[in-house]
Image: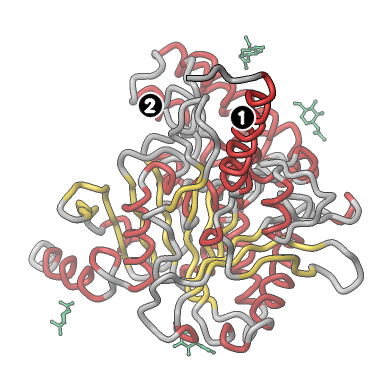
Amino acid sequence: MESTSPNHLLILLLLLFFLFFFHCKPTLSISLLPKQALPTKSGYLPVTPTSDSAIFYLFYEAQKPTSPLSQTPLLIWLQGGPGCSSMIGNFLELGPWRVNFRKTPDQPLALEPNPGSWNRIFGLLFLDNPIGTGFSIASKPEEIPRDQTHVARHLFAAITAFIDSDPSFKSRPIYITGESYAGKYAPAIGYHILENPGRVNLTGVAIGNGLTDPAIQVATHAANAYFSGLVNERQKVELERLQSEAVALTEAGNWSAAVAARGRVLQTLQNVTGLATLYDFTRKAPYKDDLVEELLRNDDVKSALGAKRHVVFEVCSDLVDEVLHEDVMKSAKYMVERLVKESRVLLYQGHLDLRDGVVSTEAWVRTLKWEGIEGFLGAEREVWRVNGELAGYVQRWGSLTNAVVLGAGHLVPTDQALNSQAMIEDWVLGKGLFGSAQKENFTTNSLGPMSM
Ligand SMILES: *[C@@H]1O[C@H](CO)[C@@H](O)[C@H](O)[C@H]1NC(C)=O
Ligand SMILES: *[C@@H]1O[C@H](CO)[C@@H](O)[C@H](O)[C@H]1NC(C)=O
Ligand SMILES: *[C@@H]1O[C@H](CO)[C@@H](O)[C@H](O)[C@H]1NC(C)=O
Ligand SMILES: *[C@@H]1O[C@H](CO)[C@@H](O)[C@H](O)[C@H]1NC(C)=O
């Protein structure tokens, strides 16, 4: 065999280089966002006729609708915060494609299909609310809402603009859904829709691990942590003292001091328990919303989603959080009281959440001024199974349903994708334990003999 001359070697190396380059190029150019993961439509919706402020939206049509699209339910998702982007909901929780949040640090970021997506049989609209959040635009900081009435006005403008953008949207039943601080946004926009009838076909409101009546809810942490075995008696007493401060300041309408006091309750709970996150006391590390931020700072992804170039994506906006500071401790319960009379309400909680969990929700629900409340509190809490496996508990009376989701923390769809999908589908379609007639019959029959 001849020896390879230096020239030949160079050519060979060049050849190898080009082979390598052309081989790799397609891999490199595969976007973080596969074509199938593109939304049906996305962009911006105006919030007032007089400014450039706008709400960013992403819409995914139902994958396998079971009815004509003009009758297919449409879910609207709102993230909490205040100031966190609904792209967390989309890419970490319930959207059709999620970041690979179970990856090890050395594996690259990628999107993977979510078998528990909430758009399997329903349309799904994500809104970055309020303006200044996620990809949404606040043309001036002064335009960012400072209270729920203002939040609702902006959302109403955005939702009606979305509905008007396609004649087939007009007749679709609309469900407002959301999580955490959306425990206030969802009732606020629902209430506003009822006040302005004829524009939005509101059919129900669903709230996951919500903050809805903060004064009642802040008073539950000590007992919840104590009876979960996470604090001792002395720490419980200390937490109770801090909680009473938060409650007293809220009752005095000293909003700013009240938020700070609530912060001390949560920070103390965090400090004494040493948990990775209060959002799920079994987690070894917090939820990976940083991956959503990494995804959405990619320029190709941004332009494919129709987001404005100049907006630097943040999962949560400190500015919006700051502007809504004085709103935090204000209650949205009166809006739920109207919604439960004129619409349907689903509350659900991942049961490992120490911030806005099961006990915290039950505490304000039992104070609802609603003619069905006695019926609800007396209704059986049924064991809920999905495909034969224990999924949680469902308690329902008339228009109010409360579901406890086992094996989930604050972000229920992240932790229990398929069960969260079964829950939302059954609730919207009125099936199983989430269904209509069956429950009253059972309760009436079982209470009948006793009341004689
Ligand atoms: C609203 O949705 C319901 C289904 O929940 C449908 O029967 C009704 O026709 C819709 N209303 C309007 C005004 O389109
Ligand atoms: C609000 O509470 C803080 C802390 O207790 C107190 O210093 C402040 O004076 C209160 N403000 C009003 C207006 O009462
Ligand atoms: C919690 O711990 C941090 C860090 O040790 C400390 O700075 C903070 O003051 C503590 N907060 C409370 C409310 O105990
Ligand atoms: C509920 O009871 C009524 C009257 O007994 C009956 O007609 C109806 O079919 C029952 N509904 C269900 C879902 O069992």
Colour mapping used in the image: secondary structure
Q: CA distance from mark 2 to mark 1?
A: 56 Å
Tell whether circle 2 marks a residue whose Cβ is less than 8 angstroms from ligand 3: no
- Amino acid of disc 1: Leu
Q: Residues within 10 Å of mark 1 (few under 14, many from 20)?
A: few
Of circles 2 and 1, which is in front? 1
Which disc number belongs to residue 282? 2
- Amino acid of disc 2: Thr
Q: Is residue 64 above or below residue 263?
A: below
Q: Horizontal placement of 97 versus 265: left or right? A: left
Dot 1 falls on a residue whose secondary structure is helix
Horizontal and vertical percent position of residue 214: 58, 43
Q: Quadrant of residue 314?
A: top right
Q: What's the residue at 65%, 49% (across, down)? A: 85
Q: Quadrant of ligand 2?
A: top right
Q: Horizontal placement of 5 versus 343: left or right? A: right
Q: Residues within 10 Å of mark 2 (few under 14, many from 20)?
A: some
* Quarter of the image where the C terminus is located: bottom left
Dot 2 falls on a residue whose secondary structure is loop
Horizontal and vertical percent position of residue 443: 18, 66
Q: Is residue 239 above or below residue 11?
A: above
Question: What residue did someone put label 1 on?
Answer: 12
Horizontal and vertical percent position of residue 407: 32, 38
Q: Is residue 387 above or below residue 229?
A: below
Horizontal and vertical percent position of residue 174: 52, 74
Q: Horizontal placement of 356 versus 156: left or right? A: left
Front-lying residue, 28 or 150: 28
